[in-house]
Image (tube, helix red, strand yellow):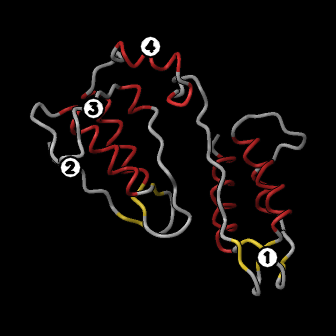
Amino acid sequence: MLRPDFAVRRTGERYDRADVDAFVNRVLAATERGTPSGPELTRPELTRADVQNATFGRPFFGPGYAAEQVDDFLSQAVSWLPADEPPHRTAHKTTDHTTHRPEQSDPVQFEPPQFSPVRLRAAYDMDEVDDFVDRVMATVNRRPVDRPVTDRDVREVAFSVVRVREGYEIEQVDLFLDQAEDWLRHP
């Protein structure tokens, strides 16, 4: 089976290349009948549920693979894998919550962003951003929150700009807000 050749983007919906490459290696190793290539690969067991529930980092800056191409590949890969999980994985999941993968009906959990702090140049007030991001993450992850955030709230939010004290990199926060607006528009 040929390795997919995903387009690399600097903007738009994209996935972390290292995350995708590692997962694609697992998919290819699980579907090929020969020995997996590379010394670091052992014969991983992978199921349809693993592919359907795969998540990847989303870079704020820099290149990443085009998300729709990766998603299309994963949709095809589902049919190449067994439907049932190996018995040792099922037993392991019940005792170790760190390896829990969400079931089909579980909502996708979004990861909170990490912004670079800057000093002596224009930046967003850290406390204001942290408070708003906490509300956004609670809303998109369907956790209880006093004031759920809407996509309109994200579009209209205005943070104080600080110059002397430490603040968050403006461009990183703005990119996150674009992503958050998309999450809220397409739940």
Judging by the rendered image, the residue that carries numbered circle 3 is 44
Chain-order first, disc 2 or disc 3:
2
Say which label, 4 or 3, has the lower sequence index. 3
Give the side of residue 79 with respect to residue 136, left or right.
left
- Closer to the camera, 181 or 164? 164
**Pointer 1 and pointer 3: residues touching (CB < 8 Å)?**
no
Image marks 2 and 3: residues in contact by CB distance under 8 Å: no
Residue for point 50% across, 29% down = 99
Crowd band around label 3 with a 10 angstrom C-alpha radius: few (<14), some (14–19), many (20+):
some
Q: Which residue is mark 2?
A: 3
Residue 173 drawn above or below residue 142: below
Give how far apart the Cα atoms at labels 1 and 3 are: 45 Å
Residue under the point 76% across and 49% down? 136
Query: Which quadrant is the N terminus positioned in?
Result: top left
* C-alpha span from label 2 to label 3: 17 Å
Query: Which numbered dot is residue 91?
Result: 4
| Within-10-Å neighbours for mark 1: few <14, some 14–19, many 20+ | some
Disc number lying in front (2 or 3):
3
Mark toward the start of the polypeptide (4 vs 1): 4
- The answer to whether residue 113 is above or below residue 26 is below
Q: Quadrant of residue 72?
A: top left
Residue under numbered circle 1: 166
Mark 1 and mark 3 lie on one chain; the one further toward the N terminus is: 3
Please say if 124 is above or below 108: below
Label 4 sits on what residue type?
Ala
